[in-house]
Amino acid sequence: MKAHRWQNRMQCGGFRRTHPRELIMKILKETDKHPSAEDIYIQALNVNPSIGLTTVYRTLDLFVQIGAVQRFDFGDGKARYELTDNPPEKEHHHHLICMKCKSIVDYTDFMKEELELMKKTEDALSTQHQFKIVHHTVHFYGYCRKCISPE
Amino acid sequence: MKAHRWQNRMQCGGFRRTHPRELIMKILKETDKHPSAEDIYIQALNVNPSIGLTTVYRTLDLFVQIGAVQRFDFGDGKARYELTDNPPEKEHHHHLICMKCKSIVDYTDFMKEELELMKKTEDALSTQHQFKIVHHTVHFYGYCRKCISPE
DNA sequence: ATTGATAATGAAAATCATTTTCAATAAGTG
DNA sequence: CACTTATTGAAAATGATTTTCATTATCAAT
Ligand SMILES: [Mn+2]
Ligand SMILES: [Mn+2]
Ligand SMILES: [Zn+2]
Ligand SMILES: [Zn+2]
C-alpha cells in the first residue's frame, strides 16, 4: 500500500481524516508485529490519552473494509491486525504460529512457489466449485526455536 | 480415525466413557458440516435434554487434545469443529469460506499437489526458521455460487 | 474565518462466546 | 455393593467485541 493510498480510499468512501485514525495508522505502520486491538489501544494511549478502545475497534474495521489492513484469527481468541504491504516491499505472505508462546512469524521464503500454486488452485476452485475467491490464508502451527530448546 | 480409535485414546489418557461424550462423538460422526459448540449442543438436546453447553465445550476440548477433532477459526467469532478423518476416506483437506453466507466447503481436488508443496515448505521452514511444525491450515475466502448469482 | 450538516468519538452498558466454580452425579474398580 | 474420583450441569465470571447515545470534530459551503 503506497504511502498515501489509504487516504485516497478514505476520501473516496466519504470517510473523514481524524486524529484517532491517523494515530492508529501510524502505529500500524511502525510495527512489524501482529497487534490486537488492545495492543494498539495501549500504544495509542501514550500519544492520545483520551482515545477510546471503541474507536480503535471501529477504526480497524474501517481499515479492513477499505483494504488497508488485514485481520487475522490465529486461534488465541483475539483478532490480530496487520497493515497490507508494509513496508511496501513486503508483499503478501504466510504465517508461522508458535503454539506455546503464541509468537507469530512472517515468512517470505518459498512464497514464489507457494503463490504460484495458490493461484493455480484458486483458478481451479473458481471453476470446479463456482467460488469467486478473494483472498486466502496459510498458517503453519508448531513450536518456535525458543519453545523447542529453552535454556 | 478408525471407528474405535478415539475410545482407545480416551482410555489410555485415563478418561471415562460417558453418555455426553458418546453422544457428542455420534453427532460429529453424522455431520458433514463444521458445527460450532452451540450447534452441537442444540443437536445433543434432542437426545439428552439435560446435557449442558459447558459439557459440550469441555468434551470438544478433550477431543481436540486427543487428536480426534480439529478446531477451526473461520473468522465468524466462534470456533468450529470437525472430526479428524471422517469419513475415513476423507483425509486432511482445506477450506473454502463464503464471506457472505458463511458457508464452508471442504475441497479435496488438487490436494495431492498442495500437500506435496506444504510438506516441502514445512521441511524448509523447519530448518530455515527453526520451527517444529505440527499442522497447518489453508483457507480460501470468497463468495459461493449462491451468493454470486442469487435468483 | 464562520456556519451548519453530519460523521466520528468516548464512556458506559450490552452482547456473545467461552471459562470457571462448585456441589451433585456417574464411571470404573475391587 | 461400596469407594474413589472424574465428570457433569447450573450459575456466575470472564474477556473480546459491539451497541447506544450524548458530545465533539471534520469538512464543504458560505
Ligand atoms: Mn504477517
Ligand atoms: Mn472441513
Ligand atoms: Zn514459542
Ligand atoms: Zn455464500
Image: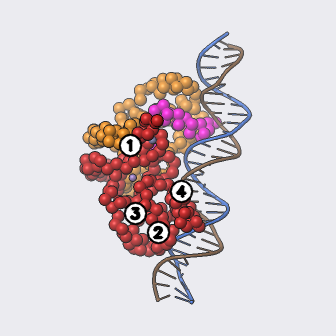
Chain colours: A orange, B red, C brown, D blue
Quadrant including the N terminus of chain B:
bottom left
**Residue A38, percent from left and from top:** 55, 44
Q: Residue at x 43, y 58 (%)?
A: B31
How dense is the environment of label 2, judged by Cα within 10 Å: few (below 14), some, or many (20 and up)? Answer: few
Mark closer to the observer (1, 2) = 2
Q: Amino acid at mark 2?
A: Glu
Q: Secondary structure at mark 3?
A: loop
Q: Amino acid at mark 1?
A: Phe
Q: Earlier in the sequence, mark 1 or mark 2?
A: 2
What is the magenta range?
A50-72
Position of B24 relative to A45 (above/below): below
Q: Amino acid at mark 3?
A: Ala
Residue B68 disc label: 3
Q: Earlier in the sequence, mark 2 or mark 4?
A: 2
> Horizontal placement of B83 versus A46: left or right?
left
Return the residue at label 2: B22
Question: CA–CA distance between discs 1 and 4?
Answer: 24 Å
Return the residue at label 4: B38
Residue B28 in view: yes
Q: Is residue A37 magenta?
A: no
Q: Earlier in the sequence, mark 1 or mark 4?
A: 4
Observer-nearest of B21 and A92: B21
Q: Earlier in the sequence, mark 3 or mark 2?
A: 2
Badges 4 and 3: C-beta atoms under 8 Å apart? no
Return the residue at label 1: B140
Observer-nearest of A132 and A41: A132
Question: CA–CA distance between discs 3 and 1?
Answer: 24 Å
